[in-house]
Amino acid sequence: MKIHVLGAGGGDRAGHRLPAFLVDDHLLLDAGGAAAALSLQAQDRVEYVVLSHAHLDHSVGLAFLADNRALSEETRPITALALEPVLADLRAHCFNDALWPDFSRLPTPENPTVRFRALPSEAESRVGRCSITAIPVHHTVPASGFLLDDGKVTLAYTGDTGPTVAFWQALRGTKRLKAVFAECSFPNRMEELAVATGHLTPALLRRELDRLPASFSVHVFHLKPAFYEETAEEVARLDAPIKLLKDGELLTL
């Protein structure tokens, strides 16, 4: 499994691109910084966008990918996948012909630029060359993490989450688990805000990981830019092999 970290930031500023992870050139896990990071030719290769939740920092790239695809010679629609409540949020608040054109009906309802496909909760679905399992997590809006399996390895992706249970329980039974991409937004001193907004601190992440056997790598993303250095230092002091993801990084699992 090849992963291109298009963006790993918890906010949008110079040097911190919004979360988006391109898997094997054709599938995106979240889409925040995707359009800004990819050439038009690379965008045309994207077939699937799997969204953890509807918050703009994770979904806004889908709006611009759709706009670019609608003007492209590439005729395949983009398939956007998420839990049904997440898709409902996107339809109601983004692709509504007010905030943004409804590309699920353009250029025609029969031949749209974007097709929405609901993922079942905690059940495996085939998506292109991979299987994906969406697992609800604790956040301020409907949200899920994912298990992405290409038949050789499994990547676990938390999306945005505070302390949660079902996601980490699912990992314990995952045989090919190779890596976990885990959010970690705030420094430890801001734990109250992290919990209230459905996010993790380094200390909270450590407690979640303590529930699991240490047989996989952990990669952290979504650090808030205003507290990046402080949070990164606290992550580095954790007694665990944890790496911070960087914009533009290429990984092979």
Image: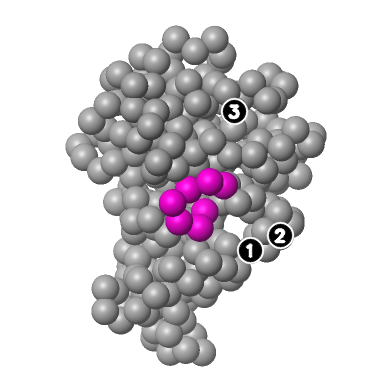
Measure the alpha-carbon separation of dots 3 and 1.
25 Å
Quadrant of the snapshot with the C terminus? top right
Q: Which residue bears the numbered disc 2?
A: 125
Measure the alpha-carbon separation of dots 1 and 2.
7 Å
Mark 2, secondary structure of its residue: strand
Quadrant of the snapshot with the N terminus? top right
Q: Residue at x 52, y 54 (%)?
A: 143
| In magenta stretch: residue 138 | yes
Q: Which residue is drawn at 79% across and 36% down?
A: 173
Which one is earlier in the sequence, the residue at label 1 or at label 2? 1
Q: Where is residue 144 in the image (x, y as percent from the top left)?
A: 56, 51
Q: Which residue bears the numbered disc 1?
A: 119
**What range of the chain is rendered magenta?**
137-143
Judge depth for marks 1 and 2 and give the one in front: 1
Q: Which amino acid does label 1 sit on?
A: Leu
Look at the image and tell me whether residue 142 can be seen: yes
